[in-house]
C-alpha cells in the first residue's frame, strides 16, 4: 500500500464539480507534481489533503490511516504557500520555532532544530531578522524550513515559486529538490509551469478540468502523452487532426494523404476524427528514407535555439513544429520557403480526448 | 488671482475661526481656574481638587473601569473581527453596522434597558450589588467603545493576509486560541492601542452610566463639583481635557509608529 492514497476524490462547490474522480498513490519519499493550467483544481486537491477543504466524496489515506475527518492541525502535514505566509511579528528563528513550541518540545530541542533548519536553508546568519527584512527567495526558504521543522509526514507546496523572479525560481527549485532528497520526505508540488514539473518530479499528474489526465514520469509525460490536452500543455508536441479510414490497418486521412499507423485502431470507427501526436524531434525537413509520411507546407518562422533549430511549418490549417540539430554546414530554411515535412507514421501517438 | 480671493486666504480664515471656536473657551476656562486666590494667578484650585480624597477615589475608580473596559473590548472585538474576516466575510457590513449602533442609540436608553433587565427582581439581579453593577458598567462601557475598538482592530486586520497566516499556523499544529494569541493579537497590537486610548478617554469622562447606576465614578464627581463650587470645576475641566488630549496624542503617536513599520514592510 502506498504512503499517500487518494481514491475517488471529488469536490463540488455549489453544484459545480471542480475535482472529479481523482486517484493517486504516492510512495514514501516520492516527489510528485500536480501540473495543469490555472483553475484546473490543483490547489483544491492539495487543500483537501491538508484538511482545509472537505471532500464531497472519496478518501485520503496517509500511512494507512484515513485522514478525511482530521482537522488540519491534527494531520502533521507541512504546507508552503505561494505568498510565503511567514508570521510578520516573529523573527526567522521564532517562525521556525513556532510549530515546535506548539508541539510542546523542550527549549533545548527547539534551539537545536532551529539551528539545523537554518543550516539546511543556508541562512544561518539571518535568524534574528524579521520577514520584511528578507528577499522573496529567502522568505520562501524560511517558509519551507518552518514547514519541515516539525518533521511532517507529508510536504505540500502550492506554487511556491510563482511569486519569485525567473533566476531565483530556477535556483530555488534545485534547492527544494535537493532538500527533499536529503530528508526523503514525501512531497506534492503544485505548479502550472511544465518546466518546473519536468525538471523536479519523480512523477507528474497532469490535471485538466478537475481530473487527472495522465500520471507518469517526466519522460513518459513528455514523450508519450495520452490525451490531446497533455500533448498540447506539456512540451511542444504537434497535434495532427486526421480521419480514420480503416480500423484494421490503422489507416487515416491526413491533409488529403492516406497513411497507416501499422497497428489497428479498434477503439475507433471508420470516419471518426482522430488526434495524432508528432514530436518535433521526430519530424524532418525534406524527404528522408524510411519516413513515408509527407506533408507540404510553407515555413512560418524559424527559431534558432543554439544547438537546436525549431522550424514552424504551416500545413493546411495546422502548424507543425520541427526540431533539427544545428548543422553549421547546412543553412536553415527561411520564412516563406515551401518545404516538405516528413515523418514515420508508425511513430505517431494516438491521443484520447 | 490675488491673495484675498485665493483659496489659501479662506483656508486661513477657516483655521482662525476654528482656533477661536475651540481655544477661546478653553483659554477662558484655564484663566478662570487660576483666579481662586484673590488678586493673583495661582494653582490653588488645582491643589484643592487634586488633594480632595473624593477626586482620588473616583479617578482611580474610573481608571480601573477604563482598563477593564479595554480588556473586555479586546477580548470581545479581536476574536469577533478575526472570525468575521476569516469565515463570514459576507457578513462584514452587517457586523460593522451593529458595532456602529452605540453611536445612534443614546447611552441613557442602554442604561434603562440594563436596569429593566438586571434589576433586583430579575433572574440576574446584577444591580443588587456593587460588584454586579460594576460588571454592568464595564459591559455598558464596552458597548460605548465598540464602534471605535471594532474599527481600529478591523483596519489592523486588513493589512494582514489572515486566511493564509491562519492556514500556515494550523498546518504547524496550532489551534484557534494559539493563533489568536500568538499571531493575530501581536500583529494588531498597534491598532488595539489606538482603540484603547480612545476607549480610555471615553470612559474617564462618562457620566450617564455612572450616575444612573449610582457608582462613584469620575464623571458624577465632576458634575457634583461643578454644581457646588466656583473655581474648582474650571480646574477639573482643564484636567479632564488634558487627559483626553493626552490620549489622543498617544493615539496619534502609535498610529504614526504603525505607518512607519508599514512603510518599512513594503520598501
Ligand atoms: N471556495 C470556492 N468556492 C467556489 N469555487 C471555488 C472555490 N475554490 C476554488 N473554486 C473553483 O474551483 C476551481 C479550481 O480551483 P483551484 O483548485 O484553485 O485551481 P488551481 O489551483 O488549479 O488554479 C476553479 O474554477 C475555482 O474557481
Ligand atoms: Mg492554485
Image (cartoon, rainbow, N blue to C red):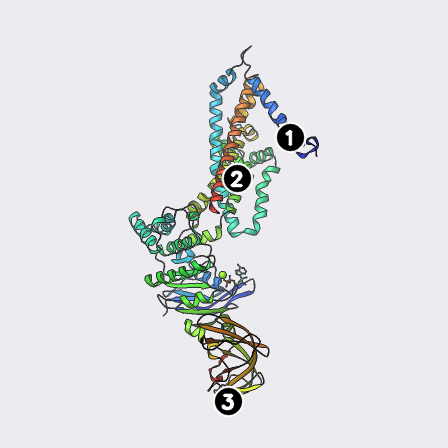
* Disc sitting over residue A249 in the figure: 3
The extreme front residue here reads A329
Q: Is mark 1 within 8 Å of ligand 1?
A: no
Against A316, is B188 above or below?
above
Residue A270 seen in this snapshot: no
x then y, percent, for residue B265: 47, 46
Against B45, is A158 above or below?
below
Chain letter, disc 1 residue: B
Q: Residues within 10 Å of mark 3 (few under 14, many from 20)?
A: some
Residue highlighted by disc 1: B12
In three-dimensional space, the C-alpha distance between marks 2 and 3, rounded to whole angstroms, equals 79 Å
Q: Nearer the viewer, residue A146 or B202?
A: A146
Quick check: marks 2 and 3 in contact, CB under 8 Å?
Answer: no
Q: Is A102 situated left or right of A228 in this image?
A: left
Q: The N terminus of chain A lies in which quarter of the figure?
A: bottom left
Q: Residues within 10 Å of mark 1 (few under 14, many from 20)?
A: few
Element type at mark 1: helix
In three-dimensional space, the C-alpha distance between marks 2 and 1, rounded to whole angstroms, equals 34 Å
x then y, percent, for residue A281: 46, 77
* Disc sitting over residue B101 in the figure: none
Element type at mark 2: helix
In the picture, residue A174 is in which quadrant?
Answer: bottom left
The extreme top residue here reads B39
Residue highlighted by disc 2: B149
For the residues beneath circles 3 and 1, the answer to whether they share a chain is: no
Residue A342 seen in this snapshot: yes
In three-dimensional space, the C-alpha distance between marks 3 and 1, rounded to whole angstroms, equals 95 Å
Amino acid at each position: 500500500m502506498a504512503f499517500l492514497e487518494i481514491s475517488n476524490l471529488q469536490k463540488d462547490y455549489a453544484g459545480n464539480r471542480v475535482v472529479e474522480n481523482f486517484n493517486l498513490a504516492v510512495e514514501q519519499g516520492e516527489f510528485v507534481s500536480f501540473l495543469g493550467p490555472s483553475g484546473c483544481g490543483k490547489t483544491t486537491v492539495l487543500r483537501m489533503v491538508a484538511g482545509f477543504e472537505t471532500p464531497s466524496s472519496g478518501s485520503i489515506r496517509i500511512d494507512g490511516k484515513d485522514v478525511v475527518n482530521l482537522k488540519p492541525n491534527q494531520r502533521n502535514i507541512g504546507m508552503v504557500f505561494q505568498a510565503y505566509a511567514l508570521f510578520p511579528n516573529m523573527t526567522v528563528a521564532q517562525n521556525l520555532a513556532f510549530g515546535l513550541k506548539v508541539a510542546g518540545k523542550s527549549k533545548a530541542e527547539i534551539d537545536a532544530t532551529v539551528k539545523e533548519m537554518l543550516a539546511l536553508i543556508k541562512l544561518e546568519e539571518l535568524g534574528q531578522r524579521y520577514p520584511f527584512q528578507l528577499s522573496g527567495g529567502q522568505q520562501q526558504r524560511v517558509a519551507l524550513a518552518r514547514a519541515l521543522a516539525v518533521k511532517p509526514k507529508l510536504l505540500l507546496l502550492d506554487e511556491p515559486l510563482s511569486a519569485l523572479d525567473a533566476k531565483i525560481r530556477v535556483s530555488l527549485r534545485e534547492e527544494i529538490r535537493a532538500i527533499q532528497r536529503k530528508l526523503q520526505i514525501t512531497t506534492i508540488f503544485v505548479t502550472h509551469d511544465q518546466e518546473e514539473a519536468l525538471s523536479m518530479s519523480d512523477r507528474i499528474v497532469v490535471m485538466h478540468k478537475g481530473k487527472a489526465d495522465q500520471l507518469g514520469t517526466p519522460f513518459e509525460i513528455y514523450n508519450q502523452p495520452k490525451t490531446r490536452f497533455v500533448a498540447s500543455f506539456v512540451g511542444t508536441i504537434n497535434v495532427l487532426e486526421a480521419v480514420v479510414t480503416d480500423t484494421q490497418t490503422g489507416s487515416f486521412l491526413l491533409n488529403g494523404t492516406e497513411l497507416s499507423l501499422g497497428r489497428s485502431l479498434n477503439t475507433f470507427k471508420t470516419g471518426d476524427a482522430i488526434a495524432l501526436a508528432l514530436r518535433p524531434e521526430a519530424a524532418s525537413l525534406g524527404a528522408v528514407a524510411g519516413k513515408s509520411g509527407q506533408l507540404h507546407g510553407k515555413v512560418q518562422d524559424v527559431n534558432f535555439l543554439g544547438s537546436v533549430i525549431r522550424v514552424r511549418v504551416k500545413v493546411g490549417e495546422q502548424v507543425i513544429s520541427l526540431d533539427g540539430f544545428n548543422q553549421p554546414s547546412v543553412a536553415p530554411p527561411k520564412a516563406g520557403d515551401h518545404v516538405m515535412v516528413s515523418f514515420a507514421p508508425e511513430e505517431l501517438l494516438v491521443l484520447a480526448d | 488671482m490675488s491673495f484675498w480671493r485665493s483659496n489659501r486666504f479662506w483656508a486661513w480664515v477657516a483655521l482662525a475661526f476654528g482656533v477661536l471656536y475651540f481655544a477661546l473657551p478653553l483659554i477662558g476656562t484655564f484663566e478662570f481656574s487660576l483666579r481662586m486666590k484673590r488678586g493673583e494667578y495661582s494653582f490653588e484650585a488645582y491643589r484643592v481638587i487634586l488633594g480632595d480624597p473624593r477626586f482620588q477615589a473616583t479617578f482611580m475608580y474610573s481608571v480601573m473601569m477604563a482598563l477593564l473596559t479595554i480588556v473586555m473590548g479586546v477580548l470581545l472585538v479581536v476574536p469577533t473581527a478575526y472570525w468575521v474576516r476569516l469565515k463570514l466575510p459576507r457578513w462584514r457590513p452587517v457586523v460593522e453596522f451593529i458595532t456602529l449602533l452605540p453611536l445612534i442609540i443614546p447611552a441613557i436608553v442602554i442604561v434603562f434597558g440594563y436596569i429593566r433587565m438586571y434589576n433586583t427582581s430579575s433572574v440576574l439581579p446584577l444591580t443588587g450589588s456593587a460588584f454586579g453593577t460594576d460588571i454592568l458598567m464595564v459591559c455598558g462601557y464596552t458597548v460605548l467603545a465598540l464602534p471605535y475598538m471594532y474599527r481600529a482592530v478591523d483596519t489592523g486586520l486588513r493589512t494582514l493576509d489572515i486566511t493564509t497566516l491562519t492556514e500556515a499556523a494550523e498546518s504547524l499544529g496550532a489551534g484557534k486560541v494559539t493563533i489568536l494569541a500568538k499571531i493575530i493579537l501581536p500583529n494588531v497590537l498597534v491598532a488595539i492601542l489606538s482603540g484603547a486610548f480612545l476607549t480610555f478617554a471615553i470612559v474617564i469622562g462618562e457620566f450617564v452610566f455612572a450616575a444612573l447606576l449610582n457608582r462613584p465614578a469620575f464623571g458624577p464627581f465632576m458634575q457634583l463639583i461643578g454644581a457646588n463650587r466656583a473655581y474648582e470645576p474650571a480646574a477639573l475641566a482643564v484636567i479632564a481635557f488634558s487627559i483626553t488630549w493626552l490620549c489622543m496624542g498617544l493615539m496619534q503617536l502609535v498610529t504614526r509608529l504603525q505607518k512607519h513599520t508599514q512603510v518599512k514592510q513594503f520598501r
